[in-house]
Every structure is written in structure tokens, then in C-alpha cells.
Image (cartoon, rainbow, N blue to C red):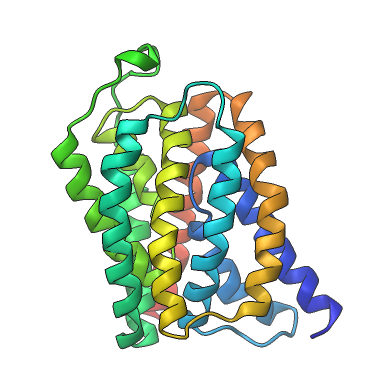
Amino acid sequence: MDLSFILVIFAIGFVGSFLSGMLGVGGSIIKYPMLLYIPPLFGLAAFTAHEVSGISAVQVLFASIAGVWAFRKGGFLNKSLILYMGVAILIGSLIGSYGSSLLPEAAVNVVYGVLALIAAVMMFIPKKQVDSKPMEQVTFNKPLATILAFIVGIGSGIVGAAGGFLLVPIMLTVLHIPTRMTIASSLAITFISSIGSSAGKILTGQVDYVPAIIMIIASLIAAPLGARASKSMNTRILQIILALMIAGTAIKIWIDILT
């Protein structure tokens, strides 16, 4: 293992985790394609789709808890939302991650492409203005939230994500949760989901531990920085950044799948 390998993997983990903390996602929406495409550009061996999903699953576990810690104060964590969606997504992610070992690499990439495309479309759906609603008055449809979290868990478990890149648009457009509460609470739900994803990947031998450890170190540094940055940013800007990031990733992954 040479210095260039460490630096490239650390940089991928740092950028992805900073965006994770800032936007309330687990970071896999950006780290998945980065791990697939960037190492070969520097003459490093390419990771397989299964290796990428395994590395992402373990790394997101640490990136999300670091982000949640930064949001522990301020009243943005909705405990009821976290409980209902967290339990459902944990079960779904464990099923998806364990079952992913039975899928070929192409299928894992297709699942990722479908999830990214759905998330990109949802981010451009007009949203009700709920950011002005007092945090203590926020309510949501509990059965719907539970069902959607379970479905997201299965899909995200397959690709080693924690589902944050789908949870955010669902919470904003379907459940009508205010943006800052969405970002903070989705990080907590993402952490719960990543427990199931990591367990499934580890049990099925899909984790390459050296790059995973490098990315974990990067995430512990970058995720809290991103979370702090989000507190001072306009919520509309945060939504636009996330929408463009997801759309760009979806386009890239589908071009590769189809060609």
C-alpha cells in the first residue's frame, strides 16, 4: 500500500463525508461512484461493485454518527421520526445487505442507478413551505414513514448506502418535514440503517478493511465540519446542492450501465 493510495482514498472519504454532514445524507450517493471511478484515474486498482458497497456501508456508519453528534443540540432531532423510520430501515437494510451477496456486480450497479434516479426526480418536485413551522408543531404520517423507510432500507442495503440520499427527498416532499429537521433526523436514521448494512456486508465478506479504515478516519474529521457548515447556510441552497449532486450521479451511473 503506497502513499498515493492512502491520499486518494482519504480524499474520497473526506469530500463525501463533508457533504454527508452538510446535507444530511450518508455520503454514499457521491462516494459510491467516486470509489468506482477515481482510483483507476491515479493508476490504482479498481474496486468491484461489491467491494465499493462494503467499504461504503462501514464508512457511513461512522460518518453518520459524527454528523449526528454535531446536531445533538438545537432541537432539530425529531425523536418520533427517528424511532419509526429507524426501526423500519434497520430491518430493511439488513435484509438488503445480506441478500446483496447473491447478486452479480451489474445488478448492484443497476440498483444504485435506480435509487439515484428516483432521488434525483424527487428532489425537483415542488415542496410545501414548511420551514417556517415551529419545530414542536411538526407532525408526519407514521405508517407511511415506516413503509417507505423499510423499502429504502432494502435498496440502500444492497448498494452499501444508508439511504440518506433517498430519506432526505422523502422527508421533504412526502412527509413535509422542515429542511433543517430533515437533515439532522435523516443523519440519525442513516446511522441506524448503516448498522444493518454494515452487519450484512461484514457477515457476507464484502468489506475491504484497509480502505474502509482510511475512509472512517476521514469521515470522523469531515462530517462534523459539514454539519457545522449547514447551520449557517440557506436551506434552499442546501436543497439545490443535494438535487444537483444526485442528478449528476444518476446520469453518470446510467450512462455507464447502458454503454
Does 71 appear above or below 63?
above
Residue 167 drawn at (x, y percent):
35, 46
Q: Residue at x 52, y 58 (%)?
A: 61
Q: Residue at x 66, y 75 (%)?
A: 211
Viewer-closest of 5 and 145: 145
Does 176 appear above or below 45?
above
Residue 256 drawn at (x, y percent):
44, 76
Q: Residue at x 41, y 33 (%)?
A: 182
Image quarter in which the C terminus is found: bottom left
- Residue 102: in sight, yes or no? yes
Q: Residue at x 58, y 43 (%)?
A: 67
Left-right relation of 16 to 158: right
Residue 126 drawn at (x, y percent):
29, 30
Q: Quadrant of residue 171?
A: top left
Q: Quadrant of residue 243?
A: top left
Does 81 appear above or below 7?
above
Residue 123 drawn at (x, y percent):
36, 41
- Residue 162: in sight, yes or no? no
